[in-house]
Amino acid sequence: MHQMTLAEIARGLADKKFSSEELTKVLLARITQLDPQLNSFISLTEALALEQAKAADARRANGESGALLGAPIAHKDLFCTQGIRTSCGSKMLDNFKAPYDATVVAKLAAAGAVTLGKTNMDEFAMGSANESSWYGAVKNPWNLEHVPGGSSGGSAAAVAARLLPAATATDTGGSIRQPAAFTNLTGLKPTYGRVSRWGMIAYASSLDQGGPLARTAEDCAILLQGMAGFDQNDSTSIDEPVPDYSASLGDSLQGLRIGVPKEYFSAGLDPRIAELIQNSIKELQKLGAVIKEISLPNMQHAIPAYYVIAPAEASSNLSRFDGVRFGHRCENPENLIDLYKRSRGEGFGPEVQRRIMVGAYALSAGYYDAYYLKAQKIRRLVKNDFMAAFNEVDIILGPTTPNPAWKLGAKNSDPVAAYLEDVYTITANLAGLPGLSMPAGFVDGLPVGVQLLAPYFQEGRLLNVAHQYQLNTDWHTRTPTGF
């Protein structure tokens, strides 16, 4: 049962081949048995899961149907879940139980999804390796000595190891797509504003976006269907109709114009990954797509711009964690200043502290114009490059990451080296565009992803291309040994 996709589970439940309760028990037992070697979960919610599964079975018995009704999933541990620990992978929130459900959690629960637990993540979503979590590093099921990617590494490792069929995740600079690439999954970052951020603990508010992680594009379409939609509680949510993402999966790719930026194939890209990307291009050409070389000239400035903007927003967002209202509080503070200093010093890990300091510096009176304002101008140039490109092509294709997953601890002493791994993903966040990563092959036994980018609100187009590619390749069907 653990090998079934979301789509297969939906069909099995509809045909009464098994119940949601039976499936939930199988997966909970599997998590208990296998997750200790992965560390992909922070909290298991067995009682809630069984309660939701029984309720889903009752709804089906009463004639209800739906692709997510009775389907087991997990939530990245920055989506607030009422009465359940929502830690953000941090000591700061280790004792925090959210008093309400995030909109994404509420929407999926209403659709009948069963929550198995909360998945591990980089602390406050800051990282590319899932090594900054207060609860320890997550291991990549394809090689337990390597990272699964971050910050949604827990969700990615759990789905890749067949502990569950799909999970929610978030993407601020590539944190859905990069773990998807490292663990042989399909991951989608929707258009900014497509999925509500209400109840999703913020890292960088103008960049964060929730989305699905699953094994196939078909499953991502099912999960996104349940997540997407306007939310009046979120001032950045966009009131745009949500299409039926599954309906367009079968569309032909004949005549589809695919742009390949020449800047993607620079010296920093592993030549073995470049070869796999070219193989993916040939596969899509067989399906009728037309390939065109394009240019994104300001891509080279994206990383420095991102690592000014994101920490600046983080320094503002994380100021609420001060030891006064909720979260970690130091013992016996001498005065208010001591309370702030020690609570934050004890509650935040090194990577979070580093980014807060960078952000505070960039926003300070003497440096705001020199750094933050210039970074925002670069952001506009990056967006303009994409707008010009999409006048010529329908989607943009390239590598998701310049290298396969690295060994645990390999980049801990050099944070900038880890930052550079985001070179292909962060531009979509700066511009607010939808992006998808899908499996494209293996290098030294480690998965590699190909990234697709589309114009605003064209998630359906990305899912269509990925689904057609997956009908003609089998990379996404490979399972890590031992799982």
Image (spheres, grey):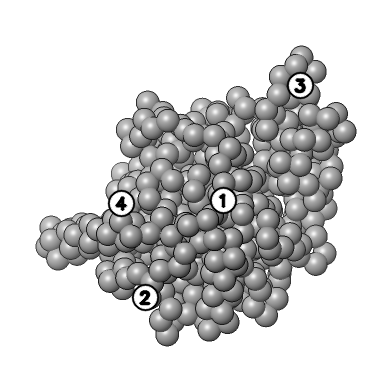
Mark found first going from the N terminus, 2 or 4: 2
Q: Amino acid at mark 1?
A: Ser
In the displayed structure image, the side of residue 145 where residue 80 appears, left or right: left
| Disc 1: which residue | 252
- State yes or no: discs 1 and 3 in contact (Cβ < 8 Å): no
Q: Residue at x 79, y 44 (%)?
A: 27
Return the residue at label 4. Answer: 313
Give the number of the mark in front: 3 or 4: 3
Alpha carbon of mark 2 to alpha carbon of mark 3: how far?
Answer: 51 Å
Near-viewer residue (396 or 443)? 396
The tag earlier along the polypeptide, 1 or 3, is 3
Mark 2 highlights which residue?
Answer: 263
Q: Quadrant of residue 219?
A: top right
Please report the residue visible at 37 percent of the width from the left and 55 percent of the height from the top.
429
Circle 3 SS class: helix
Element under disc 4: helix
Q: Looking at the image, is 455 positioned above or below residue 107?
A: below
Which of the two labelled residues, at mark 3 and mark 4, occupies the earlier sequence position? 3
Image vertical order of residue 269 relative to residue 27, above or below:
below
How far across and down, in percent of the image, does residue 445 sit? 70, 76
What is the CA distance from the residue labelled 1 to the residue labelled 2?
29 Å
Q: Residue at x 51, y 61 (%)?
A: 289
- Judged left or right of residue 280, residue 396 is left
